[in-house]
Amino acid sequence: MHSKLPDTGTTIFTVMSQLAVEYNAINLGQGFPDFMMSEELIALVNKAMLDGNNQYVHTNGLPLLREKLAHKVGQLYSTSINADEQITITPGGTYAIYTALTSILNKDDEVIVFEPAYDSYIPNIIINGAKPVLIQMQFPSFNIPWDEVKSKITDNTKAIIINSPHNPTGAVLREDDIEQLKQIVLDKNIFIISDEVYEHLIFDDISHQSILRYPELLEKSFVCFSFGKTYNCTGWKIGYCVASATLMKEFRKVHQFNCFSCNSFVQVALVEFLDNEAAYLSLGKFIQRKRDYFQSLMQATNFKAIPSYGSYFQCYSYKDFSDENDMELAIRLTKEYGVTTVPLSSFYQSKKDDKVLRFCFAKKEDILREAAERLSRV
Ligand code: GLN
């Protein structure tokens, strides 16, 4: 068989999580919280099932949930969106990104991708017959080199993927970045895929530069979100996409014949839970305390923190004490020290090795303490 993705292997998250299980290591690799989610939300889901909400809902998502989301967007970003035409509920953020790319890409289109890049973007582009155009963010600030972006725009450029707060680095886009983005796309036929799954996981009182704040950009964007990240339940696999009505029409053509509609009971529960603004507005501070706690513990190790301003992740450099390849070190830390991480090189096509590992700090304090204790022996 002729593979459609000949160069794609198993995602690094699966590889590292399996290794963690095999060696019974603390898993700071794959990004997921290890603490309990809201029991109130669990109870609402149980109730929704018992109340009989167990059949298909509308293919675009439960109408009431979409209305609640449109209201939330209005409150947070002062942009008015039409729940009926501009929001679709999806089985997670990754699915939303894949569907967005699939609904716009044709053969030989080019898509600008910033590296290090979340690992699904490039295979999503290639499977659609399009071509990723890779641009490396500056190291170690992970700022976007906008002049290089301008120089790589061609007649074939179809889209730019942005991601803030950023996985794997924890970098966040600022107003200046949005200005640069506007200069590049506003007078051209270039779409934006904005991965905003860490919308509420942003620290140090920085305001999230959502594309939803900018109606002229939203006109040409698919903006992707994740309830799993917002409510500490990554295994629930539910999210949504917001786009202009024209783009959403195309998105839905793909979506309706792929997943058709997402599970009913979680959507019913979320309608009520979305009224609880504190549940999402308090998340940034809560996760920030974990970043700070882990960072203070890591001072007793030889790893050097690279600033993280959002997401579940922080990158740490080990270049001062080892020149080992990052993949090899990540495997050795799991096997010999019982701590699993993700090597940053796995987010570069070229496997560029800056001697950096990604750590997920969305974990219980005693787990973070034990992990740092083990790492202090490295
Ligand atoms: N987003 C998570 C991470 O970056 C993993 C999601 C996945 O395993 N597909 O670790």
Image (spheres, rainbow, N blue to C red):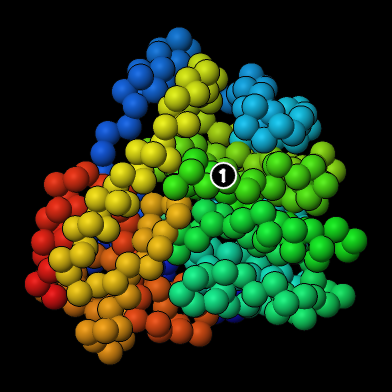
Q: Residue at x 13, y 75 (%)?
A: 378
Q: Position of residue 195 (x, y in %)?
A: 59, 53
Q: Residue at x 28, y 78 (%)?
A: 318
Q: Nearer the viewer, residue 261 or 275?
A: 275
Q: Which residue is mark 1?
A: 207
Q: Is residue 26 left or right of residue 60?
A: left
Quick one: label 1, few (<14), some, or many (20+) residues within 10 Å?
some
At label 1, the amino acid type is: Ser
Task: Tell me if residue 219 comes above or below residue 61 in the rendering.
Answer: below
Q: Quadrant of residue 244?
A: top right
Task: Tell me if residue 136 comes above or below residue 241 in the rendering.
Answer: below
The local secondary structure at tag 1 comes to loop
Q: Nearer the viewer, residue 251 or 308?
A: 308
Judge whether residue 127 can be spotted in this image.
no
Q: Residue at x 68, y 59 (%)?
A: 176
Q: Is residue 169 left or right of residue 137?
A: left
Q: Residue at x 79, y 71 (%)?
A: 157
Q: Nearer the viewer, residue 84 or 205?
A: 205
Q: Position of residue 136 (x, y in %)?
A: 58, 78
Q: Quadrant of residue 59?
A: top right
Q: Residue furthest bottom?
A: 323
Q: Is residue 147 left or right of residue 139?
A: right
Q: Quadrant of residue 240?
A: top right
For the N terminus, which image quadrant?
bottom right
Q: Nearer the viewer, residue 191 or 378?
A: 378
Task: Tell me if residue 213 comes above or below residue 112 in the rendering.
Answer: above
Judge whether residue 345 can be spotted in this image.
yes
Q: Position of residue 261 (x, y in %)?
A: 61, 34
Q: Position of residue 63 (x, y in %)?
A: 67, 22
Report the image quarter containing ligand 1: bottom left
Q: Is residue 350 left or right of residue 152?
A: left
